[in-house]
Image (cartoon, grey):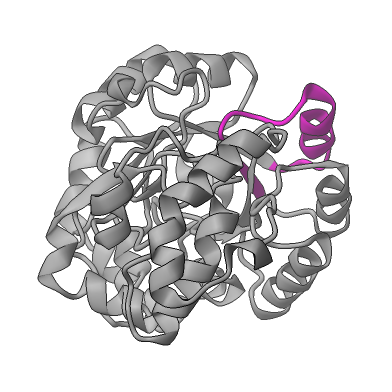
Amino acid sequence: MTMRQLFGIDVPLVQAPMAGVQAGALAIAVSNAGALGSLPCALLSTDGIERELAAIRAQTSRPFNVNFFCHTQPAVDADREAAWRAALAPYYRELGIDPASIKPGPGRAPFDAAAADVLGRVRPAVVSFQFGLPPDDLLARVRALGARIVGCATTVAEARWLDAKGVDAIVAQGFEAGGHRGNFLTDDVTTQVATLALVPQVVRAVRVPVIAAGGIADANGVKAMLALGASAVQIGTAFLLCPEATTSRIHRDALASDAASHTAITNVFTGRPARGIVNRIMREVGPISAKAPPFPLATAALAPLRAEAERRGSGDFSPLWSGQNASGCRAIPAAQLVRELTAT
């Protein structure tokens, strides 16, 4: 099945949902350009999801994707939280922050019945999930809406699991990709391989269309993935400098600098492995720290450091998400980027 048939799009390109650096404006621009725009909902309240989706509906008649996380919310472990804050204590002192004033918080919410209620009112064309899939009853509710369901796999085993669950397409996320790893069957990041190796293996292993993700930054990269059997590509990092993205000035400057050539997988920002540009906190506390509470609980203790450092013009404590190939990042309209990426 072609992407036109599956998603109702004109070109085989999906804009990666990127929580924290975009809202509906980027999804609108990409969808109006004939690709599949995406709205990340992990950081939005139910009301926020409804507002963003209403804005998207008002500005495009084209299909778009709504993305949710499917993690299990962990219980707060007081001892681990204390150890994490102790590791960050020197930075609190340096920036004049009282750690006693910091309240623990969930940071990101998994897909739930309230979110499913919103989807029932909006009925998007595509719904995608990260970190596996929601419980069967919630997945059945989404399927009953007629939405195409997309899952994300970082290994062949995860792709087969998603295929058995009846998804309509699978994102094969290579190790190069920026942001959070989509893994869910194992926490062992050494099981993850590069896009070039992953995509053809997944294509052979599953029955549904495969969307290649990770390290794709130009039209030649798109063509290469399609030649390997992918039905479409998913691109995130290249959109981060587009005016429609909400990427901060500090993050934009990092992406446009030589620093973008050095990325690493880290868990210090959220408690879950994710790829970003190496900065001070990653070098000094991580990039992987055993003290970081599980996703998404690590975020709360780091948030005031990030806020204060950014107020001073520094990205030392900011998650500067980026894939290994930031060469496609340019400050051009998203529609123009879509056209250039899919030029034949």
Q: Nearer the viewer, residue 268 or 166?
A: 268
Q: Nearer the viewer, residue 102 or 330?
A: 102
The percent position of residue 256, horizontal first and vertical second, equals 19, 75
Residue at the location (60% across, 72% down)? 24
Residue 338 visible to the viewer: no
> In the displayed structure, would residue 163 be above or below residue 265?
above
Can you tell which quarter of the image residue 210 is in? Answer: top left
Instruction: Left or right? Give the position of 42 relative to 281.
Output: right
Question: Is residue 277 in the magenta section?
Answer: no
Residue 42 visible to the viewer: yes
Residue at the location (33% across, 79% down)? 250
Instruction: Left or right? Give the position of 187 relative to 344.
Output: right
Q: Nearer the viewer, residue 96 or 47?
A: 96
The percent position of residue 121, horizontal first and vertical second, equals 88, 57
Q: Quadrant of the C terminus?
A: bottom left
Residue at the location (46% across, 29% down)? 183
Question: Is residue 133 in the magenta section?
Answer: yes
Badge count: 0
Q: Nearer the viewer, residue 139 or 5?
A: 139
> In the displayed structure, would residue 329 be above or below residue 115?
below
Instruction: Left or right? Give the position of 137 relative to 283.
Output: right
The percent position of residue 124, horizontal first and vertical second, equals 72, 54
The percent position of residue 77, horizontal first and vertical second, equals 66, 34
Residue at the location (56% across, 73% down)? 28
> In the displayed structure, would residue 41 be above or below residue 231?
below
Q: Which residues are magenta?
A: 126-147
